[in-house]
Amino acid sequence: MARSKEAPRLSLAFTGIEPRHFDAYEPSKWTSGRFNLERMRAREQVEALAGVVAHALGRSFGLLLTQDHPTLFNRKSVEAQWALFGRPEAARRLAKPLMEREKSIAELLEDPLLTHGEAWLAIRVDFEGVEVGFQCHGHAHLDRKNAARRVAAEPERFLEILAALPHSLGVAEGADAIRAAWQDDVSGPEWLTLGQRFSRADAIAAGAGLAETVAQLVVALAPVHAFVTWSPENDTVGGVAWLAEEGQRALAASTAVAAEPARVAERPPTAPADRAALSWSYRPDWAATPARPEVEPTRGPSSRVRERAAELSNEQSGWSYSGPVRMAPEAPRSEPTFRDDRGPPRFERPRHPGTHDRGPPGDARGAPPQDRRDEAPRDRRAEPGRPDGRERRGNEPPRGGPPRQGSPQERPRGDRPRDHQSRDDRPRDHQPRDERRRDDRPRDDRPRDGGAPRRPEPKVETWIDTPGEPKVKDHVRVGAGLFAGRIGQVIELTSKGNFKVVVGDFTVEVPQAGAVRVVTS
């Protein structure tokens, strides 16, 4: 709501109203909140101007400023900035019941504007200029009725007040018309106005001097406000009597409640020995207040799950689950390949098929024996007459014949010369394929019998049915359903009377009739 203060203390001095202050109230900006900052800056200057006027009026008036952003209290439209001088706060609280009595419920709901509630001495800044004067809307029923009856009862006094106004207001020639308009008790959206309007150009040209001109006009119009507005001293509508009657009714009601005699509560007849003790009551007319039924607060699914998890955690702290455990699967292990011609068993490496990867005749590959001698190079073909089909290398004598003269095979071992050329200094890549494979194969430390190390077989538990009704923590055999014949452990008895059983990695609900208590042998 609008801000109210009796004696404003403003930190800003009035420096004049600039074009940007008027532009803040352009019609296209009335309902938009994007221009709140512009309207706040304009409101600061209007507040500074109102401070100068309030200093000239004194403490007999209260100051209210309208809001600078769209809200429900200005129908979400800021058309102008108002500085309103009216009743002090204490006088407004006194007149508020009368204002509400005169208004209908529809007006209270449909017209919440602060400027329509009562008569004001107002300063209004809008897009087109500045207006200063007395303002009274048709929905200010209390002040409108009081003004009409006061002007009709004392027209000469009202004309004297109008004649004392400054000539700039221009009311000297139309005083009789103003009196005739104000003495009609008409309720509606019409305004009773009396003041002066400054154009936009004139207000900008006046600069800081506009404050002195506005203050003189407001001080001059103060007698008009005091003559027509309602107050306990200016009551032409019977408001004081009505407030007195309301006060008397409220006082009588409170007095009746306080003066109501205390009554002794009636009690049922008792035994003669107890009547003397119950002849007086410490708290007469006392009755116990009926206790309200306790309503369990609504809990969501998450809270119920957390509570149940906490209960299970507390229950499991004293015992551990000892039901069947499913072993984790292990990766298959490859078996060794036996090769009798290459020493101990080793793991066979996968090789791409090629000309050097064909096995002997009749091996597991099933390849038919082929004679590859014609495919070898001409210089490495077997000599005719060799039984093994291999060519002769170096000084190697023909198999089955005597060694040649001067060959190493002919001389004794101790007489052989140190011939460095006899060593195989070829690079590793040029060594025979069988030797290279034997060196490159990973070492296998497994048993020489060719089998994998035996793992201890898991213990197999034997479950025997036993008589008796199963309970929580007992092992049971599921009698029906998807897990029929499986062994599980009871962890909970549900509200429906069923067992909640843990079977492996699953939790199932089993009727009591479908669970048989078992023990391990």
Image (spheres, rainbow, N blue to C red):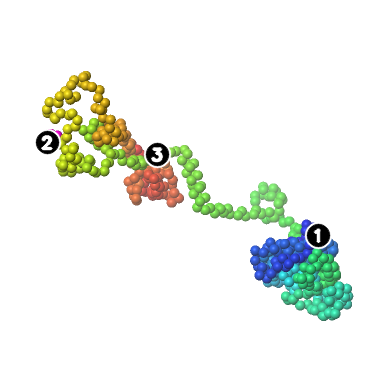
The residue depicted at 14 percent of the width and 30 percent of the height is 398
x then y, percent, for residue 87:
80, 65
- Up-down: is 298 above or below 128? above
- Of tags 1 and 3, the one toward the viewer is 1
Front residue of 399/462: it is 399
The residue depicted at 17 percent of the width and 29 percent of the height is 396
Q: Quadrant of residue 205?
A: bottom right
- Up-down: is 139 above or below 512? below
The residue depicted at 43 percent of the width and 38 percent of the height is 320
Tag 3 residue: 322
Tag 1 residue: 7
Kindly identify the amino acid type of the residue bearing the numbered disc 2. Answer: Pro
Mark 3 or 2, nearer chain start: 3
Front residue of 306/197: it is 197
Q: Residues within 10 Å of mark 3 (few under 14, many from 20)?
A: few
Q: Quadrant of residue 355?
A: top left
